[in-house]
């Protein structure tokens, strides 16, 4: 297995994986395939230039992905946002997601970030346990943050000092 940093040329494959992620596990994420489509491929290509987005690859198959964005502004640029974490069901429990987090944290340190933040659906116990094992701490629950049809779900906010 190897970790690769995605480039703009990877955009179609990356977006296909995100569509599959939303199609099969929509309730696990705050975003939606329609949001990705509305943003457009050009914006995603730009994001793959600007952000640090990694995939864990084995035999040509992407097993896990995740991204890191630096917050903008003089008073906030010491923080990064971990986003888009996903591991294929077959890769769960193998350490794939932890390896992506390692790559994101290494990138964060290399660009001088002091802390990382992330959000996840509060009812996603498996993801929460992963982040806690990796040193992330829950600092808030945003009630009814995400609309799932006619139901509103809470979102958990976590952070880690580097």
Image: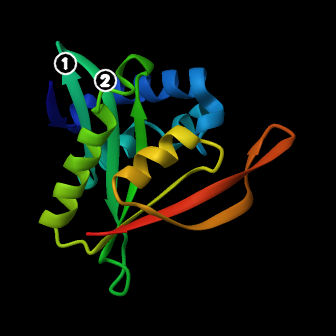
Place residue 105 in its image quadrant: bottom left
Colour theme: rainbow
Image quarter where the C terminus lies is: bottom left
Measuring from the top left, give residue 121's x and y in whole percent.
Answer: 61, 47
Coordinates of residue 29 in the picture (x, y in percent):
58, 40
Residue under the point 65% across and 63% down: 141
Q: Secondary structure at mark 1?
A: strand
What residue appears at the point 31 percent right and 77 percent down from the top-left corner? 77
Question: Can residue 54 be seen at all in this image of the molecule?
Answer: yes
Q: Position of residue 126 (x, y in %)?
A: 51, 38
Labels 2 and 1: the sequence-earlier one: 1
Query: Which quadrant of the figure has residue 30?
Result: top right
Q: Position of residue 150 (x, y in %)?
A: 87, 40
Q: Residue furthest right?
A: 150
**In-front residue for pair 148/154:** 154
The reply to whether discs 2 and 1 touch (Cβ–Cβ < 8 Å) is: yes
Q: Is residue 2 above or below residue 36?
A: above
């Amino acid at each position: 297995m190897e970790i690769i940093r995605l480039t703009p040329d990877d955009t179609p494959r990356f977006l296909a994986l995100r569509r599959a992620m939303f199609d099969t596990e929509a309730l696990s994420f705050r975003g939606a395939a329609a949001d990705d489509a509305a943003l457009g491929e050009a914006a995603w290509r730009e994001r793959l230039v600007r952000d640090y987005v990694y995939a864990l690859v084995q035999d040509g198959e992407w097993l896990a992905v995740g991204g890191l964005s630096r917050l903008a502004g003089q008073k906030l640029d010491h923080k990064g946002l971990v986003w888009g974490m996903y591991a294929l069901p077959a890769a769960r429990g193998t350490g794939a997601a932890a390896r992506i987090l390692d790559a994101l944290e290494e990138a964060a340190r290399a660009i001088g970030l002091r802390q990382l933040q992330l959000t996840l659906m509060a009812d996603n116990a498996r993801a929460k346990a992963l982040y806690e094992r990796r040193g992330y701490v829950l600092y808030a629950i945003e009630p009814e943050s995400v609309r799932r049809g006619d139901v509103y779900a809470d979102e958990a906010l976590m952070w880690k000092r580097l």
